[in-house]
Every structure is written in C-alpha cells, then in structure tokens.
C-alpha cells in the first residue's frame, strides 16, 4: 500500500470519527435525561428547581410552555457536571483577582 492511499484512508477515518463524535455529543444530554448518566453530585444552589408544569386547559398553554422552558433549563442533561466545570474554570482563572472598587 502506498503512502497517498494510506493517508487518504486515514483522513476518511478521521472525518468519520469526527462526525460520529459530534453526533454523540448532540445526543448525550437527551440520553442523560432519560437514563441519568450524569454521576456528578448535585450543585449546591440555594433555590428550588422548577417542577414539571401541568397543562390544565388549552388557555393555559402559554404558561405551560413557559413552565416547560424553566423546567428544561434546570434539568437538561449533564447540567450538574457543566456547573461543576464552570465553577472550576472560574476558580482556576480568576483566583486571586479582585475587581477594583
């Protein structure tokens, strides 16, 4: 097998792996929502998370959709891990830096 053919096969395999990784990354939050894959401890937030809204009538559809958005914002997949990473990132980058007041 000559070098150009091997390089072309490697590039094709790399593209397939990149596409597959992207598709998996898109589906991970949904899979976590259904199967609870996120093993991170819950964030220590001093508030109540939104509960799943009830749709009592057609007229209450607008409030149901607003409640559904609030529920999703609090419960989307891997939220706990993302909050932990965000706090670690802020701690690493801004440790010891104080704003001038």
Image (tube, rainbow, N blue to C red):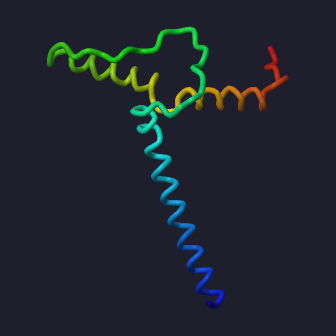
On screen, residue 92 versus residue 55, left or right, reads right
On screen, residue 66 versus residue 10, left or right, reads left
Q: Is residue 5 above or below residue 92?
A: below
On screen, residue 66 versus residue 3, left or right, reads left
Q: Is residue 56 above or below residue 90?
A: above
On screen, residue 40 versus residue 63, left or right, reads right
Could you tell me which residue is drawn at 75 percent across and 26 percent down? 91
The answer to which of 101 and 28 lies nearer the viewer is 28
Q: Is residue 38 above or below residue 10?
A: above
Could you tell me which residue is drawn at 39 percent across and 21 percent down? 71
Q: Is residue 4 above or below residue 21?
A: below
**Image quadrant containing the N terminus:** bottom right
**Image quadrant containing the C terminus:** top right
Most extreme residue toward the bottom, as rendered? 2
Could you tell me which residue is drawn at 66 percent across and 87 percent down? 3
Q: Position of residue 88 (x, y in %)?
A: 71, 29
Could you tell me which residue is drawn at 49 percent across and 60 percent down? 19
Q: Position of residue 2 (x, y in %)?
A: 64, 90
């Amino acid at each position: 097998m000559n070098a150009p053919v091997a390089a072309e096969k490697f590039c094709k395999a790399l593209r397939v792996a990149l596409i597959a990784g992207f598709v998996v990354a898109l589906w991970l939050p949904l899979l976590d929502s259904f199967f609870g894959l996120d093993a991170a401890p819950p964030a220590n937030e001093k508030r109540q998370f939104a509960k799943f809204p009830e749709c009592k009538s057609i007229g209450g559809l607008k409030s149901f959709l607003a409640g559904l958005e609030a529920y999703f914002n609090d419960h989307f997949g891997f939220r706990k891990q993302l909050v932990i990473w965000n706090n670690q990132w802020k701690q690493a980058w801004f440790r010891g830096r104080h704003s001038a007041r």
